[in-house]
Image (cartoon, rainbow, N blue to C red):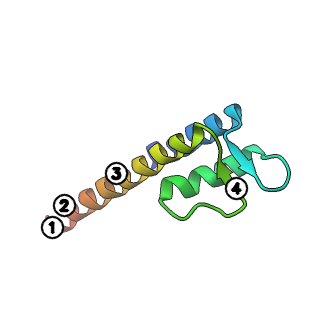
Amino acid sequence: MVVCIIGTIFIFAWEYYTHGGIVRDIGNTTFLDNLYFSTFALAGRTLPDNIHPAGLCRYVALVENLIGYMSLALFVMVIGRKVVR
């Protein structure tokens, strides 16, 4: 489960990086900026102030956010079932 989540973060970060979908207020973005954004998007947290998605990547970020919420729900369900047993 953890490997899938980390893989999802890296896949989306690579997509943002190759398509130039993440824009920084000052300067260009690096792969680490895209990785940072992807981690926040998947975790369902508030996105960083100085980095934001542009163009169609806004919708990709939305999908990543939904995948993060579904992964969190699945994780909580699995842990809950283990605790009940």
User: How much space separates mark 1 and mark 4, taking CA atoms?
Assistant: 42 Å
User: How much space separates mark 2 and mark 4, taking CA atoms?
Assistant: 38 Å
Q: Secondary structure at mark 2?
A: helix
Q: Quadrant of residue 13?
A: top right
User: How much space separates mark 1 and mark 2, taking CA atoms?
Assistant: 5 Å
Give the x, y percent position of residue 24: 76, 52
User: How much space separates mark 3 and mark 4, taking CA atoms?
Assistant: 24 Å
Q: Quadrant of residue 25?
A: bottom right
Residue 57 in sight from this viewpoint: yes
Name the mark nearer the viewer: 3 or 4.
4
Q: Residue at x 63, y 53 (%)?
A: 37
Q: Residue at x 41, y 47 (%)?
A: 67
Residue on which disc 1 sits: 84
Q: Residues within 10 Å of mark 2 (few under 14, many from 20)?
A: few
The amino acid on which the numbered mark 1 sits, given as a three-letter code, is Val
Give the x, y percent position of residue 9: 55, 45
Q: How many marks?
A: 4
Give the x, y percent position of residue 31: 73, 43
Residue on which disc 3 sits: 70
Q: Quadrant of residue 49?
A: bottom right
User: How much space separates mark 3 and mark 2, taking CA atoms?
Assistant: 17 Å
